[in-house]
């Protein structure tokens, strides 16, 4: 423990086991180790039990499995996002308790005895069926972080009345994730109704002048509804993560 | 009548009043004159009494007045768009019957005896108060082309309930012009409800990632509502013109 | 029927079968159901017999077939756009009356006894042979919605004279769909001639500085011809849909 | 009160003062009025005492004053953003209790007896001195919504050590607003340290390849730090609003 | 010959072999045929013997072969650009005299007895070896149109001295095609030396911030050398065509 | 004369008037002087009498006058582009023979005795009245370089028939400059008719999705007409320069 | 001095003037102060005597003067970039020793006794006269940092021979700053010749498709010359700074 | 040796072995050969022993092997970048001493007796594991050019403390290459700490609004840290090359 190491060092100086100069030299490199433990410690306090996340694209299956191994050995729960089923097939050989979440395209591997209470309420909304992968990634992330998640899918603004079936959930949510491709108008409409923060997730679903998600991204950034903030295109994980932080802040801090 | 002129020419050849060579020379230039009159004639049939339009930006006041003069002498009604009041002050000296439409930023000058019947129903909707200039240009254009116009302003999607106060108008419209800046989601929502075509007009109202109207333009092009088509940013005239054509087609052709 | 349900509820109040409080609770959720039936009803009135549309990209063949099943059981006609032939092969096993439209890349499945009258006139123009898929999607859509469709293909502006062979059709059309890739100038030229609205459809046909259809999209948005509105890149369905709405408005409402 | 109106209507039916048909006609328009009151009511519950906001650009001073009048007469507190001092000069003639916040470029006008408790903790960070206007708008917004605000300015990543002077505040914040122009890296660095959500606000401060804030906007959207969401360029109000919602959710709901 | 056909028609009227009505019917379609022959005639004068061009991408091999058939039956020479070798294999079965130009990726099929004189001088320069396909397409096009072509490859500006080995050719050229990807600076340097027009062809060769040829395109459009004009990215055919027109104008018209 | 200087140097070595070492030192700097004279010489041959051009933006009036002075003292004719009238007022004090060309926004100052013959034929076409400044700059440039110029203005494609009034000029041109803003379709249409090269000049005339001339620029680069090449947005000088080079090559070289 | 403070603290522990716990508490905040002094110290070693820089845009004159005051009181030399002359007029009242550099648009204020030796060789090249402001800012920056600067202006690639007059300087430079607008090809050409690193500075000089400097920026990033790196558009200071670091590294470290 | 050749030529003139005319003819081509040798000579002086580089994409394996052959026969060392292993398999048949560097995706082939001393210190930093290929290309390039390279990988700003473990290396580096995708903030943070130039390499690692590396590219260009310059997206070679030039300038010139 670093704090202990510092105190020990000071003790050694006090007891004159080492010179002031030697202590000074030892302390030169210290701040960043301190930074390290501070961060860890801080995370301990606030994030206790959050899973560690592996973003799979651009990593080979052996790399993914190895990173997971190291984390699991340290007692962490693991969430691997954007993982093909073929990755899971290798993964599960090593960790039989791992699960594959097909729609979210994610692998989870949790220490079996651990059971996280689902608190608060995060509503994950998706405009179209083609947005579901991103929405499921958001929902899974928020759940794994300890949030109760309610899903409201296929509620795009072109059929605005369907949105209203979810009136009660929108009103009682502590955070909403609104996922939409095409024109991306869902967060604007939801943001005009909801009382809690809305995290907008544009998707690359669309064609032509969608320009791979640029269109809904700009829509969401330009929303005239207050209370909406945006994450990167297709970033379901990011949307779920922020929403869960908001939800848990509300739940834990009270 | 040119068709007649051609037949007459052929008759003259037949009757040997002119030589084959002379007839050939006369026919050389004919197609394009024919094209010319065809177009005029065609317009007569369909567009009878439409005003001629002068787009003012980039023209000096004397140029605008002179173009208007030529048109008015030919019996045309005139609509001058994006005209400053200072243009109107010069304009009205020459044509005392001219009127200035402040919100639309337009001058009209109509032959006094003419009175156009207002037919059908065009609904002009605007999302925010800052979009009103563009909406008014659309409304004025549609009116001058003989459409009955109903205005529904300040109905942006962030307060979606205000939109529903206009339910009856949306249902009974023959064409709708939906004007919106910021995220530009209005046409998507209206397009999901309306049964008639919706002409979407993005505006440059907004800031930051609006990029001068690019954001609502992309939103509108990517709408998942069927029945929506888009004109250029801030092009109220274009939106009103297309809507009036649709409205009048429905009214006149029956 | 919802209207009936509301009246019935009021009747029950009147007859004191339920209390005011109970009625109020029942009415709380009502608006959106009302919204629902209003929309359906409205569509009934105007859109009677329009096919339901399934946009295939991003859906698996089983999903497409299942969605179609549900619609067909409800008596709907179905149009599935951007469908590969392999989708059709599965589709036709389930619905032997289905047809594949190769150039449009679409499947249709119509209740056999139904025969829609082809009214009015929609002209679908395409600038080049590479734009035909998009044009055929537009033409098929307009036809299925009950429009008489005339096709004028390979009429790009670089050979402007070919356009004039279609003079009579352009003059008599109630709506025109103008499909073009590359520089996308066709709608400008047609818009200068036609008396009816022109729906411009940019395509991603082209290379280099076409930037996947951005070039013709901007061309069409900036047209100096009045009466032109634009839909998304490659959105033949959207172009045909708007044109059919315009055409039918003109035909039905008279 | 609409709820009352509905109940009254039902009562009248019950007491046979009006017919079922008459009640039905009255109820036709009701859903949206219901939507209206629902929304208002909902806001009352969650947002009690939030100021109403007027976005000033594109509005004339008389328009701004009139909108403010209407709101103030309804008992609302008012926040007018992006207001020049010249606007304030007219404003204060009408409402002597109004205040001008120079750095934020905002006017506030609060009912004198009202005093909002400052709860929780929102940290507003700004990378450079040129970002202060946006940061101040965020801070003022959060404060007016009842948040305790701590400011940490001039903490850009090029002098990363200055950031660490605010270690304690970052650790104890319930929400952080991170404002940055130029390369916009501040939210990434803060997001890697903080345990609460970070709302990133890109600014148009910069030159050349900043492209009016596009550069920091993209930076923030692409952050590899979890827990960061983004609002529009220069949208200090939006950043402060979301952060305050998060902060108050945590404070109020416990 | 159409002119003759018109005169003959008139002669027939004169000689009363056909009625005026019949002649009129024949003339109805005439303007555009006239337009056609005018164009053809004009081309005859200037372009005598130019090959007809088929742009292959997006066409099936049978389509390409059929289009070629029709042209060849009309006595045309044919140039098919961007053709895979697999296209050629089918092509040559039908037209054994066809040739495949591998580097240019083009098929030519010329009437055997025809032999075009190579006049004037077109210099085709390419900055890097990866630009050769585009350069060869330009060179082949110019050659087929009757230009003497000199090639100067691998003369990019990063080794500016290599450019000077071609000093004499640059000085004596009547038109230069300068092909370059990456930063696309070659036309600027050549344009500063040459006395004839330089047709710049940007290529999509490059990576990263080349953005598929956007970088060299912008470079070339912004050249501060006079006498440079630009065609589309990778448009070797277009560059060769314009250069040949310039070269032949100079050669033929004197 | 440098060639002579080199020979003289060699002669001096031969006659032993200077040492080999001295000659070598003299030759060290020679290549670039040689390059210099080569270029000058080359220009002499081809460009005899072309004016020198000063691009005025970003230069102060004194700078412009001084640069002109130096050129005029060397016997050059001068063309100063994009010059305000205020620049001309100072200019003409120094050079009373200077002329101001208002529409082109240019100053010319020619040695009085010089009179350039107007050869060949360059047609300068402009789509709209707002494009005239750019077109006039092109026309003036081509004229000053010794080309006969024919102007055809206000021939935009939305009124395609007006274009055909210029049929004869288009057919007989040796080079065409086609200037257009908005959708920029003019060069495509002209390029489909003309037999000579067409130099397309996009202008920044337009609004909304014109994006300061990006729209017509892309249109022109993507033209499906052969024989079209493009210069920078608003670059009338560049368009006129290339067209004149083409025209004169055809005229001079024969 | 922080090092001293740490040592003193350790001394106090050693001498038991404070407890280990007290020392630990004092050290908690220390790392960042340590970071601070480390950085300062590091700068001392390498950057001794570098001026402090104030970027003026977006700061009021009083703010600039106050920041300068604080720096000058600490003994620093000051460089204020992008300063109007009006700023200088106020500045010089406070600091009479300040100088204004008109072309660079910069103010310098140096402690009078200090005289920096000009070491090594930085060549600052500019393509056109309109690029001189940026080039001068680069040159001034490099000079103030202790570099000998050689300027080579008006050496754009369209007159490539002028570049070669600077052959010797290019060959002997330790770092080159190449400033160019328009097509921005200068760094590519120079990078192909030079043996030292070339820092490319794009400028916003240009028009049309320059898009405010995007064109030369992309050109420079895509250079096929090795040894070229790029700074932001118009960032003369940045270019000069990097070049000076390179030059001084070479000079100091040997 | 060319200098000798010139002198010899002059000697021959002097000794009348050749005529003045013959000498002149020989000298005509000389400048560019001189340019050539000058460049070569210059490179000899500064770059002695640098490998020749082959950029493999767009070249066939036989082409790559042949280019390598020619270079190796001339005694050069060869570095082939972006080479697949399949290229290496052919390569090594011809040159058994060749080595494949898997992470860098590069082939090296060095003359066996040659051993380059590793001088100075270049630190290559990479933000994420997905950036390693680019970083390894940079490191390999710098090493081959004779630089001692220290690698610091996985030091992205979201875990800023990890960066500080490399404090000593950053402080003692003569040049730093900072490779980062996603938001690309690493160079800003490093640039604020380092005393030497930082060459920033954006990578296309990322998704959504990364737009293939545009996001980190803009971030790096907009850095507010002095001393940072940028190369093209994914251009590890370019980054390593510039850094090595800087490092060696510092090492060699002293």
Image: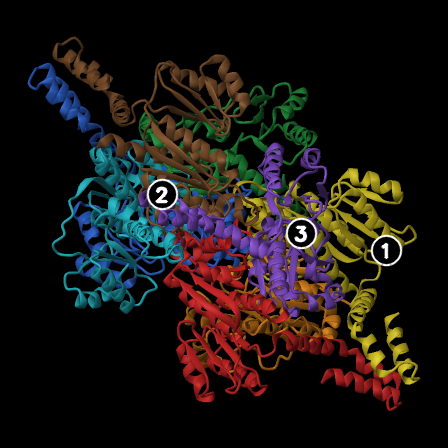
Chain colours: A yellow, B blue, C green, D orange, E brown, F cyan, G red, H purple
Name the residue tied to disc 2.
H18
Does residue B110 appear anywhere in the picture?
yes
Residue E167 picture quarter:
top left
| Residue drawn 48% across the image and 64% down it | G123
| Mark 3 nearby-residue class (10 Å; few <14, some 14–19, many ≥20) | many
**Whole-percent x, y for residue D176 in the image:** 67, 68
**Whole-percent x, y for residue F223 in the image:** 39, 37
User: Going by the image, does E60 lie left or right of E198?
Assistant: right
- In this view, G198 is above or below H33: below
The CA span between labels 2 and 1 is 87 Å
Which sits earlier in the primary sequence, circle 2 or circle 3? 2
**Depth check: B45 or G102 in front?**
G102
| Mark 1 nearby-residue class (10 Å; few <14, some 14–19, many ≥20) | some
User: Going by the image, does A180 lie left or right of C234?
Assistant: right
Disc 2 chain ID: H
Query: Which quarter of the figure is the N terminus of chain A placed in?
Result: bottom right
Name the residue tied to disc 1.
A76
- In this view, F217 is above or below D219: above
Is there CB contact under 8 Å for labels 2 and 3? Answer: no
Name the residue tied to disc 3.
H144
The CA span between labels 2 and 3 is 47 Å
């Amino acid at each position: 423990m670093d704090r202990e190491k510092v105190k020990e060092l000071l003790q050694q100086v006090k007891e004159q086991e080492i010179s002031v100069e030697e202590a000074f030299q030892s302390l030169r490199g210290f701040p960043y180790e301190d930074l390290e433990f501070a961060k860890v410690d801080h995370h301990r306090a606030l994030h206790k039990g959050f899973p560690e996340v592996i973003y799979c694209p651009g990593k080979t299956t052996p790399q993914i499995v190895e990173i997971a191994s190291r984390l699991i050995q340290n007692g962490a729960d693991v969430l691997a996002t954007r993982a093909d089923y073929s990755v899971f097939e290798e993964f599960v050989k090593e960790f039989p308790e791992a699960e594959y979440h097909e729609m979210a395209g994610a692998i989870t591997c949790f220490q079996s005895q651990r059971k996280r209470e689902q608190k608060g309420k995060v509503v994950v909304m998706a405009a179209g069926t083609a947005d579901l992968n991103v929405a499921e990634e958001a929902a899974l992330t928020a759940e794994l972080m300890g949030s109760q998640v309610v899903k409201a899918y296929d509620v795009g603004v072109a059929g605005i009345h369907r949105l209203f079936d979810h009136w009660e959930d929108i009103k009682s949510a502590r955070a909403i994730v609104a996922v939409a491709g095409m024109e991306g108008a869902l967060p604007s409409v939801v943001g005009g109704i909801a009382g809690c923060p809305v995290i907008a997730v544009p998707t690359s679903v669309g064609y032509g002048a969608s320009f791979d998600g640029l269109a809904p991204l700009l829509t969401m950034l330009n929303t005239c509804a207050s209370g909406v903030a945006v994450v990167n295109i297709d970033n379901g994980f990011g949307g779920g993560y922020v929403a869960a932080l908001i939800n848990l802040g509300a739940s834990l801090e009270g």
